[in-house]
Amino acid sequence: MRFGFAIWFWGIFLSSLALMALRLGMSSQHSTAAAAQLEEVAFAPAAVREPPFVGPPIPPPPDDVTRTIAAVLSRGDSIDRSLKHHRVPSRQLDLLYQALDAVFDPAQVKPGDYYEVAIDSSDAIRRFRYTPHRTPDRPIEVELRDGQLVAGQLQLPLERRLERLKVRIENNLSNAISTAGEGSALSDVLADDIFGAVIDFQRDPRHGDRLGVVFEKLYLDGRFIRYGHVLLARYEGERVTKLGVRYASAEGEDAYYNASGRSLGRMFVLKPLGVNRITSRFNRQRFHPIHKKQRPHLGTDYGARTGTLVWTTARGKVAYAGWQGGYGKLVEIVHANGYRTRYAHLSRILVRKGQLVQQKDIIGQVGATGFVTGPHLHYEIIKDGHHINPEHINTGRVGQTLADDQLPDFVRKRDALLHILAVGPRFAAVP
Ligand SMILES: [Zn+2]
């Protein structure tokens, strides 16, 4: 399965390269060395196209359809109300809901979602298709087959386009990315998934730092649907410079590696949530705002709205999940090598004691329980019974290196991606 995915992934990537090689060839402004390099990549084993249909192919409309109804749902609308408004017989609606029951919850409809229904001369539903506007590549289709309505979810093939983005940081990463016309989903992947253990986006960025990204955007009928994979990201800053190249290790797991094939992953990611705002740092001699006396602050506080999702920073086992005095609702996790982490003042706990968790699994939501002045997450790391500063957890640590026999292949792919970042056609809007 993983291996199949890897073939599919690199297949698409290499086909995209082939396409670029063609374009570059046509523009003929590039050095022959560059063209030769791309050519070589272009003829590497490519071939696989788009993901296959998961559902059945769409058949032509049935012959005796006498009317079709198409409607966009507005706020407060339901499929039921809309279909009744269009006088679809209620017996037919019952049959439709029965069929939908297995694949779809009508309570999940959102304003902007779209449906189409085909009705025949005997007033029976022949086909119904429901398209969520956020995921239009995954419509629900119900069809009359052998006298019975049968429902299924389709996966329409998406077009993958490889794009390149180069921006200069003014104040922070997400502003730079949104100024370039890209969405916060892309900055989240960069800050949390790729550089989440090696760049502290609260402290490290400086005016003038540069970011380069080679990434996929997925389209349906020319309309942007969502981001695919980020294949390469390079952050070049005054304080920190990091390269991340997406690559499948020997275990078949896709991860990000630096220029020499060392993983950017660490036992801990730096942040337990998707915000950068630290409101109180680790401090062994702090004056406590509630207790009005000298009291060490043995963790890092993140200011965030109630309900913000909190994830575990390393894999481990839930040692405590419940109310704990001043901590309020607390989750404590034990990790390998004598480490423990604590996540306090939660509004909701989403794990149970004894549960195994992977790095970045969601364990709760930010709240204001216990001794607090407002909603925030209090995060602690304890090593062999002693608190340590969570902001320094990864200082001086390095990741695993790819196996020797993988390095030549890694280097080839790394260089092809760096080449795209350097000279590739610029699809993304960079002001
Ligand atoms: Zn705190």
Image (cartoon, helix red, strand yellow):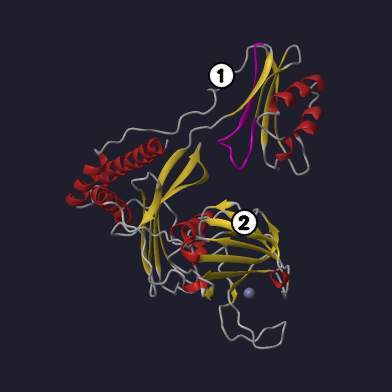
What residue do we see at 37% from left, 45% from top? Answer: 251
Q: What is the crowding at mark 1: few (fewer than 14 residues within 10 Å), some, or many (at least 20)? A: few
Q: Quadrant of residue 285?
A: bottom right
Judge depth for marks 2 and 1 and give the one in front.
Answer: 2
Q: Identify residue type, mark 1.
A: Pro
Quarter holding the N terminus is top left
The residue pinned by badge 2 equals: 363
Instruction: Provide the residue designation for mark 1.
Output: 59
340 relative to 144, above or below: below
The residue at label 2 has a CB less than 8 Å from ligand 1 = no
Residue 107 vs residue 408, the one in the foreground = 408
Picture quadrant of ligand 1: bottom right
Measured from the top left, where is residue 252 in percent x and y? 38, 44
Q: Is residue 216 above or below residue 340?
A: above
User: Between disc 2 and disc 1, whose residue precedes?
Assistant: 1
Is residue 139 within the magenta segment?
Answer: yes
- Tag 2 secondary structure: strand
Q: Position of residue 406 (x, y in %)?
A: 27, 48
Read off the magenta span: 130-146
Residue at image location 74% in from the left, 38% down from the top: 107
User: In which quadrant will I find the C terminus?
Assistant: bottom left
Left or right: 258, with 331 as reference point: left
